[in-house]
Image (cartoon, grey):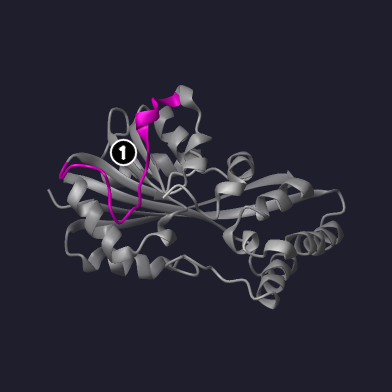
Amino acid sequence: MSTTVFDQAAAAYDRLRPAYPAEVYDAIERLSGVALAGALVVEVGAGTGIATRALRRRAAKVLALDLSLAMLRTQDRRQGQAADRVGARGERLPVRDGTADLVCAATAWHWVESAAGLAEAVRVLRPGGALAVWWNTLADRGVAWCQAREESLHRRGATWNGCYAKDYEVTRLDIDLRATGRFASVERHDTWWERTVPIADHLAELATHSPVIWLGAEIGEYIEEQRAVLEREFPDGMVRERYLCHLHVAKLRA
């Protein structure tokens, strides 16, 4: 349970992966009707705590779950006791029936087998509780520099091994949520945002993604190939990353 593809990248993941805008957490409260302050939140695939810390800053009581203990250990221990972080998977939540106010997953639901994960979320949520799933996706996928990195991965035979979805499908997730018949409402909220980072940080963050990690001995060659592309595209050495954060909130029937 303690070993995953992300173990070796935990420190870089925590430092470099993009967080989520405050608007996302505002939307979670608005669409779910769950006030985060004082809420029991079960976070699936919490990783190094990028979303965990934001939830706790809003006074939520978060149980952070992940298969990677190396990722969980990077969480700031000042944010809570060690018991608040548990090695567990989304298909088998270590939580009693009907006790959670919110179950959530930030850039992690593609690692959960959807049917089993949804059944577990429904089991542990209290009546009127909610499931919130959100993730960042690059909004520049159609531009040359972004296409170059994907094409290079494909040439090397990289795949999303271990994921239950090659990529998130926005409409498919809505369909899956509604198909359970257990949610009173399924709402979606999109947030556009951006950040600017040095090329070196952009590449180091790229190296924390599972298809790149799985390149193994080819990682160095791949990263240098992308460096050349980015240096041509961004001569000032700074990469403008534009993101679209998709949020889905499903409110359990009361």
Left or right position of 17 against 83 = right
Label 1 residue SS: strand
Q: Which residue is at 23% across, 42% downward? A: 95
Please name the residue that numbered disc 1 is placed on.
41
Magenta-highlighted residues: 79-98
Place of residue 220 in the rendered image (x, y in percent of width and height, measured from the top left) = 77, 59
Please identify the quarter of the rendering in which residue 142 is found. Answer: bottom right
Q: Residues within 10 Å of mark 1 (few under 14, many from 20)?
A: many
Magenta highlight on residue 168: no
Q: Is residue 65 visible?
A: yes
Left or right position of 103 against 73 = left
Please identify the quarter of the rendering in which residue 108 is found. Answer: bottom left
Q: Overall secondary structure of the magenta stretch?
A: loop
Left or right position of 242 against 198 = left
Please identify the quarter of the rendering in which residue 244 is found. Answer: bottom right
Q: Is residue 33 visible?
A: no
Q: Which residue is at 35% across, 64% downward? A: 113
**Residue situated in front as seen by the camera: 125 or 254:** 125
Up/down of 116 relative to 100, above or below: below
Up/down of 7 relative to 168, above or below: above
Count of residue discs:
1
Q: Which residue is at 36% across, 43% downward? A: 43
Residue extending farthest to the top is 78
Place of residue 194 in the rendered image (x, y in percent of width and height, measured from the top left) = 62, 48
Magenta highlight on residue 94: yes
Place of residue 163 in the rendered image (x, y in percent of width and height, measured from the top left) = 46, 65
Place of residue 121 in the rendered image (x, y in percent of width and height, measured from the top left) = 25, 52
The kind of residue tagged 1 is Val
